[in-house]
Amino acid sequence: MLGEFEYLLISTAARLGEDAYGASIREELERLIGRRCSIGALYTTISRLEAKGLIATWMGGATRERGGRAKRMVRVTAQGRREAAGFYRAVTDASRGVSWQLGRQRSRL
Amino acid sequence: MTGVVSRLADAVSQRLDPEEREAVWGDLEESGASATSRLCEVLGLVVRRQAEQWADWRPWLGLFGVAIPTGALLSFISRNWSDVMAIDSYVYATHWTSYIFRSPGARLDLVGVVLRFLMMSIALMGWAWSAGSALGSISRRTTWVSGAAFTILIFTATWGTTTVARVNPLSASVFTTSLGVVLPHVVRIDLVVLPALWGMRNGSRLPSLPRRSAIAWAVVIAALALWAAPGLAASFTFGRLPADYVWPGTRIFTKSRWPVWLLPSVLSWPAVYMVATSIRRVRFQRNR
């Protein structure tokens, strides 16, 4: 089972497609979750997901705005897509019939 | 200030894999992070990477099985032996005369002292190198932590203790001279810390020695420990355990109830580990 941050990272990488690399994933994640994402959390999670076979990474091209340094490109593998789909299904199932009404401190089944 | 922080961040990032360092620096450049922010981000990643390494058992084996025991023992031994060297050097330096070369007995004494210095130096360097080599081989990525612990122990494990030579009124004055003050540090740096660092570097690059070399090295290390064992007991116990032997006027030596003479065998552990890894490597290659 994926962790929450792992799921967010895989989903972001899948959405970015061929533009998925460290900085772009980080920027998109920060926009989504509304808080800072550290380089440490990002890269250790990328390594962990790669070790699990859920994503593949490789060194990509360099650009001038990166000071001529290479990118670590990310692609979601078929297994990663299955795991992410499983996580999404679990969250959706768990949320079925639940209405989160923020501010009222109460949930209704 | 920014330049200093940038250089510090660059130094910290050296702990990362080259490809990861490249990607991280590129990401930070692209996001326009400040020097301080870069340092914090890189430091955070390095700490996380190190923490991951310590989830394995090998770094703990290196730290508690090699760095701490050998570091502590070598600290005591190097201090004790440097005291012996300081006294002998002081005696020859202050009483030097050509008679020493002309008299067969005095000449023989001098040869004996020089040989003892040589054996002590070889033993310290050999033990330190094999400890460093085992540390580098056990866990390459965490060697800097266990190596730092080893080095700190070399200089601090003897704090609060003393030696026979230092409390003996006949030799105590030697340790007020610059020779007596400087020599222990020189011995520890040149004969222990530098060979250990060399060993760590070697162990990181070549995780196991060829089997014959490893066995020969282990035999040499064990022989040195056996040769030095009787004298080493005093190095370890003095100032640490209850004293029950009294030198005229002061308590200067301890006689332990537990087998202190076994302690020098700890210095052979790294060499035994090197033999074990070389045998394992040969078996692994045969099974492939």
Image (spheres, grey):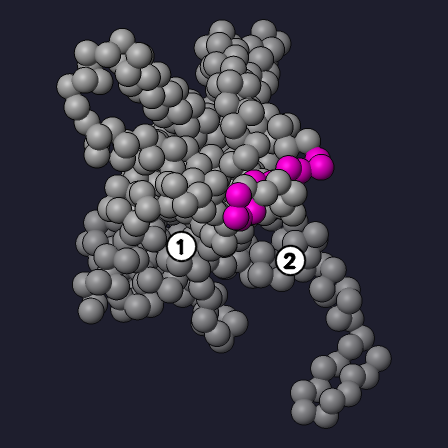
Q: How many marks?
A: 2
Q: Amino acid at mark 2?
A: Gly
Q: Position of residue B204 (x, y in %)?
A: 42, 30
Q: CA distance from mark 1 to mark 2?
A: 19 Å
Q: Amino acid at mark 1?
A: Gly
> Magenta segment, principal secondary structure?
loop
> Taking B109 as reference, is B273 left or right?
right
On what subunit does the disc labeled 2 rest? A
Number of other residues with Cα within 10 Å of mark 1, as a class: few under 14, some 14 to 19, many 20 or more: many
> Which mark identifies residue A22?
1
Q: Nearer the viewer, residue B272 or B30?
A: B272
Q: Nearer the viewer, residue B145 or B19?
A: B145
Q: Quadrant of residue B125?
A: top left
- Which of pointers 1 and 2 lies earlier in the amino acid sequence? 2
Q: Quadrant of residue B61?
A: top right
Q: Nearer the viewer, residue B239 or B196?
A: B239
> Taking B261 as reference, is B9 left or right?
left
> Circle 2 is placed at which residue position?
A3
Q: Nearer the viewer, residue B51 or A64?
A: B51
Say if residue B129 shows up in the picture.
no
Q: Residue at x 47, y 35 (%)?
A: B77
Q: Residue at x 71, y 37 (%)?
A: B257
B249 part of magenta stretch: yes
Q: Kindly state the secondary structure of the residue where label 1 is placed.
A: helix
B244 part of magenta stretch: no
Q: Quadrant of residue A36?
A: bottom left
Q: Position of residue B157 (x, y in %)?
A: 49, 47
